[in-house]
Amino acid sequence: MLATISAALVWFALVAYGIFGGADFGGGIWDLLAIGPNAERQRGIIADSMGPVWEANNVWLIFAIVGTFTAFPVVFSSLGVALFIPLTLALIGIVLRGAAFVFRSYAANDTTLALVWGRIFSASSMITPFLFGMSAAAIASGNIHVHNGVVQADFWSTWTTPFAICCGIFALGMCSSLAATYLTVEAQMRKQDDLVEAFRWRAILAGAIAAAFGLFALFRASGDAPYLWHGLTHRGLPFMLGAMAIGLVTAFMLIQRRYYIARILLMLEIASIFVAWATAQMPDLIVPDVTVQGAASPTPVLQAFLIATGVGMVFFLPSLWFLFAVFKTRNPPAQPHPLTPSPS
């Protein structure tokens, strides 16, 4: 039971990172693809939207990494060996992305330098979720074998299969759709109708691309990831079908300009996708050799991990809620103070 709860907490952190961190990555993608006469305004609203919260979103990834290292060290070490290349490149992308986002803001008076840092920020925002998607596909494919603590996997072919590439593009599409949907709400709050329309169509297009590659990845899974395919067509089928249904309703809400509803539905879709994946390969953490019970740390370690997590969440969750409440709630237009003299 302790191992199962620990695994669920790590998975919850991954879901939260996909919902919040994924939108940050998508913002970088739209920063690169900002075009038209209002391109700079598009980049401006992306930077303003990400600025207050992007560092906080990385806490979920940190928790997932530390939680895996603590509760399932065999998984941590095995993935660190088998997926050393994509995970290292993804880590470099995260570091470059954060540094470039900050440096670009301080280089605003130097057009050339700001452009260079902007391109680094955008490129890192595309590369990192793509590599994460490919790594997830490798974990579920059954091509990583662990016997007596020894990892058997090809350093390249494990994560570069057609199935993995489709999953990487699917991750890019979902991040782009998340960001565009969130940005429609941001633009609507600022009463910038032209940006609302621009991001609305991008959200619909990115969602359609993600859906197409998701279906193609599902088709490829029957041959490239048979364990995952079997799980998705049995235990994970309700969640997979639920994610598809939510995706269609989300697109309809965007067409109907119901942006707040679309944002909530898209969060539920991401959560459903992760739950479908977890349910499909349960009880394996690395298909097919590493299970939740087999990889778990000793009971005292799991107990300490769960206690520390519970205490930490008491402080972290209210703080995170307050951060979003301050910067992401709809605020009424500023009213002049009654003691402020009239401009006339």
Image (spheres, rainbow, N blue to C red):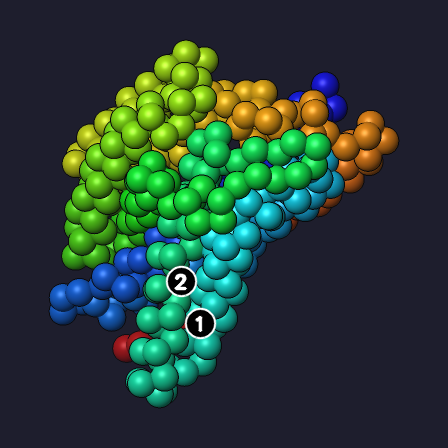
Disc 1 residue type (three-letter): Ala
Between circles 2 and 1, the one closer to the viewer is 2
Taking depth in this image into account, of 212 and 328 the one nearest to the observer is 212
> Relative to 253, is 142 on the left or the right?
right
Q: Is residue 81 above or below residue 341?
A: above
Quick one: SS at disc 1? helix
Q: Residue reaching furthest left? A: 37
The mark found on residue 124 in the picture is: 2
Q: Is residue 138 above or below residue 32?
A: above
Identify the image quadrant of residue 338.
Answer: bottom left
Taking depth in this image into account, of 333 and 168 the one nearest to the observer is 168
> Relative to 195, is 287 on the left or the right?
right
Badge 2 vs badge 1, beta-carbon distance below 8 Å: yes
Q: Is residue 223 above or below residue 336?
A: above
Quarter holding the N terminus is: top right
Q: Is residue 281 above or below residue 88?
A: above
> Relative to 121, is 77 on the left or the right?
right
Q: Residues within 10 Å of mark 1 (few under 14, many from 20)?
A: many
Q: Which residue is under mark 1?
A: 100
